[in-house]
Each structure stands twice: as C-alpha cells, then as structure tokens.
C-alpha cells in the first residue's frame, strides 16, 4: 500500500523571499518607472525599505516639462480655490494617517515621532490653505509717487521650483516646503529624502487622489549629488530650495545656478517649531511686480480718480 503524500507546510519567514514594494516616481499626475531602469534599496536596521526608483537626468527633464505645462493654469486659479485644494490634501492625508505613521516607523522613527510628524504635516497643509487668499494683502502695496499715476506692487509666482527635501524629516520637511510653494501659484519638482523616501511617494498617492492638477507637484527619488547639476543648470527651472546642512552641496548648487541667474533658497531648521511655518515662505518663491497706471484727468480743474 502506497503512503499518502505529505502535506506541504507554509514557508516560514526565514525560508521565503519577501516581495518588496516598488515605489515609482510621481510625474505629471502619473506614476512612471524611472527612465533609467535603476533602483536602489535603502536599509533600516538591516531591513530593506523597498525598491526605490533612482531618477536620471531624463526623469528631471520630464518632470520640468510637466511642471511648466501645469504652472500657468495653477497660477490662474483663484486664491480661494488654491486654498480649498490645499485643505483637501490635508483631508486626504488625515484619512491615511495610520499608513504614514507605519511607514515613518519603518524608516526608523519611533511611534511617537511618527505620530507627531504626521499630525504636524496635516496641520501645516491647513495652515497654508488659510494663507492662500491673504498673503497678497500682507505683502502687496499701493506706493506713493510724485506723478499723476497709481503705483501698485503685487506678488507673482516665480514659476517652476525644484525642492531638495529634508533628509531627516521625510514627511514634514517635504510638506513644509511644498505647501508654501504651491500656495503662491508655483509648480514644483521634489527630490525626496534618499534614505527615507517612502513617505514622499505615498504623499504622491495622496496628491493623485486629491484635486491637485497633474504636474503641479512632481516627486522624484534618487541621489542629489548625481542630479544636482541637471536641475541647477536647467533653464526652465526658476528657483531651487535646498533643505539640508551639506555646505559643499550648497556651494555646488549656487555655483551651477549662476549660469542662469537662478535663485537658491537654503533652509536648515526644525520644522516642528511653530515659527517654522510663516507667510514669508510663500513670499520667498514669488516675484514683486510693480505696475504704473495713469490717473485720467477730468475737466480743466485737473481732478482725477
């Protein structure tokens, strides 16, 4: 009599290979794989976080094309509508808060730190949503002039902004720069934290399911040293924001940006502080436009309006 075959038992964790998630880029409202086909696996305590796209020069160029195409339409939205959309991003992030807490823990933060960072990021979006229809009142002016003219100074968006996000604050550091940049009518490309990139790509999923038009925010992952000259020298990027303490990298950015007179903003602060959020960050990525308008004279008396 033949023996019955033995039942196969489920493989233990030591016997099977884990299926790692592939985190794609977020460009133009879509999730493409990197053009280069390269990936890297950041490690935390010996465990891989996943397959992370290593963006190339072509990916930067594609993101700039998407950002430029979206910028004028986004700037043309009413300030109230931009505020509604930023608030909606905060709502969507609130609904996925547990996922962000889990991913932040996977990237080395404690449970308390992860909760604090997630809640602060939601509050930061709501804060800048409230400023969308108010910052013009604070920073614009009617200027006194000696001639018979009205003279107005108004803020206009810089255009396309490239953001090198904080390495140590993978979610709050990113949100704290993205929110004021888009609140002012700019579009942006973000280079996420290289060692802690999960939160950035998941934030792209939040943007994708909110009301933000495709191309207004684009998110890349990869090595900042490799990509620095490509975005600093790109003629269709109007400004660069760098959040970090690498003085040599900052010098490289500033030197490369000289070729096209690109403004480089440097930030190195604790984004958890209350004073790290303010409307001056919106102003940092705006240009001041001054307009002259003649006062029409009425009759011989010379009175005008």
Image (spheres, rainbow, N blue to C red):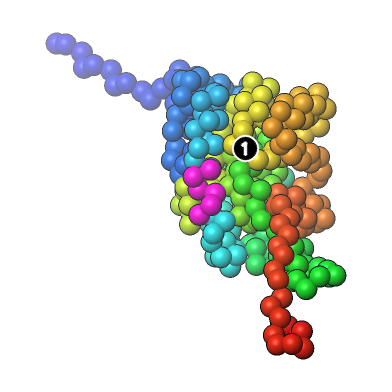
The quadrant where residue 301 appears = bottom right
Left or right placement of residue 286 versus residue 188 in this view: right
- Specify start and end residues of the magenta stretch as a single range: 68-73
Quadrant location of the N terminus in the rendered image = top left
- Can you give x and y, in whole percent of width and height, for residue 77 in the image? 53, 61
- Can you give x and y, in whole percent of width and height, for residue 153 in the image? 74, 63
- Residue nearest the viewer, comparing 238 with 183: 238
Numbered disc total: 1
- Residue nearest the viewer, comparing 157 with 62: 157
Q: Which residue is mark 1?
A: 237
Q: Residue furthest top?
A: 1
34, above or below 83, in the image: above
Secondary structure mainly formed by the magenta segment: helix
The quadrant where residue 163 appears = top right
Mark 1 surroundings: few (<14), some (14-19) or many (≥20) residues within 10 A: many
Asked if one can make out residue 183 in the rendered structure from this viewpoint, the answer is: yes
Q: Residue furthest left?
A: 1
Residue at horizontal 49 percent and vertical 33 percent from the top: 62
93, above or below 291, in the image: above
71, above or below 268, in the image: below
Instruction: Identify the secondary structure beneath mark 1.
Output: loop
Left or right placement of residue 192 versus residue 149 in this view: left
204 in the magenta segment: no
Quadrant location of the C terminus in the rendered image = bottom right
Residue at horizontal 73 percent and vertical 55 percent from the top: 288
- Can you give x and y, in whole percent of width and height, for residue 193 in the image? 65, 33
Residue at horizontal 55 percent and vertical 30 percent from the top: 60
């Amino acid at each position: 009599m033949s023996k019955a075959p033995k039942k196969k038992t489920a493989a233990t964790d030591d016997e099977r290979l884990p299926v790692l998630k592939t985190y794609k880029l977020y460009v133009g409202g879509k999730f493409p794989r990197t053009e280069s086909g390269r990936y890297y696996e950041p490690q935390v305590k010996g465990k891989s976080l996943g397959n992370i796209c290593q963006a190339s020069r072509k990916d930067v160029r594609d993101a700039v094309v998407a950002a430029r195409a979206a910028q004028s339409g986004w700037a043309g939205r009413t300030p109230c509508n931009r505020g509604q959309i930023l608030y909606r991003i905060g709502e969507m992030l609130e609904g996925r808060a547990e996922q962000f807490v889990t991913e932040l823990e996977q990237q080395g933060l404690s449970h308390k730190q992860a909760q604090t960072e997630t809640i602060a990021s939601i509050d930061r979006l709501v804060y800048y949503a409230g400023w969308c229809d108010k910052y013009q009142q604070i920073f614009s002016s009617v200027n006194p002039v000696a001639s018979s003219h009205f003279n107005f100074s108004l803020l206009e968006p810089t255009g396309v902004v490239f953001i090198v996000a904080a390495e140590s604050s993978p979610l709050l550091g990113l949100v704290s720069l993205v929110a004021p940049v888009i609140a002012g009518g700019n579009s942006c490309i973000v280079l996420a934290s290289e060692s802690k990139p999960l939160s950035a790509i998941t934030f792209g999923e939040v943007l994708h399911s909110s009301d933000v038009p495709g191309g207004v925010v684009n998110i890349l992952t990869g090595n900042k040293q490799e990509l620095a000259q490509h975005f600093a020298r790109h003629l269709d990027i109007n400004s660069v924001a760098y959040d970090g303490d690498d003085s040599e990298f900052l010098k490289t950015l500033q030197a490369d940006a000289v070729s096209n007179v690109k403004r480089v903003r440097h930030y190195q602060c604790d984004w958890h502080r209350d004073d790290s959020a303010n409307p001056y960050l919106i102003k940092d990525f705006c240009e001041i436009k001054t307009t002259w308008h003649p006062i029409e004279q009425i009759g011989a008396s010379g009175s005008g309006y």
